[in-house]
Amino acid sequence: MRIKQVSVFVQNQPGRLLAILEVMEKNGINLRALSISESGEFGIVRMIFPDAERGMEALREAGFTARMDWIVSAEIPDTPGGLLNNVVKPLSEAGVNLKYFYAATDAISKKTIVVLKADDLDKAEQILEGI
């Protein structure tokens, strides 16, 4: 399923994630997923909110540089080879390049949620809907 993700560009220094999360708390905005990556002096904090537009607005009002992108999310089995056989292999065989992805597993439901950005979102979404 296609969903919206908000990315915030921040300096790679102590307290930046704290400031972002304080904005979310102050505005009553819940996080569904969070990923952080860094590149030297800067980092990207990627977040999924129940209401992406509201999260984006709160961050911009607080002075953060942010943007919104469409990404794909899918639920896959939490089994050995689950990521390989349900995501990576089918996308690779279809010629879809993964730009990045992150995942989390729910031990109770035995399902893994995968969030990814691909060079062809339409094709990635179509393939993953068949899982």
Image: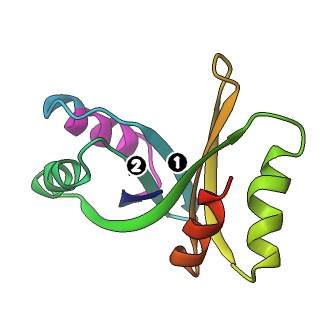
Give the Cα separation between the discs numbered 1 and 2.
Answer: 7 Å
User: Between residues 15 and 67, which one lies in front from this camera angle?
Assistant: 67
Magenta-highlighted residues = 11-24
Q: Position of residue 92 (x, y in %)?
A: 79, 74
Relative vertical location of residue 53 with respect to residue 79 in this rendering, above or below: below
Q: Mark 2 points at which residue?
A: 47
Name the residue: 89% across, 38% down.
80
Q: Which mark is residue 35?
A: 1
Q: Say which element carries label 2.
A: strand
Q: Nearer the viewer, residue 49 or 130?
A: 130
Tag 1 and tag 2, C-beta contact below 8 Å: yes
Q: Does the magenta stretch include residue 13?
A: yes
Residue at the outermost left position: 61
Amino acid at dot 2: Met
Give residue 66's position: percent from left, percent from top. 28, 63
How crowded is the residue under tag 2: few (<14 C-alpha within 10 Å), some, or many (20+)? many
- Residue 28: % across, % down: 17, 29
Residue under the image location 48 percent in, 56 percent down: 1
User: What's the amino acid at mark 1?
Assistant: Ser
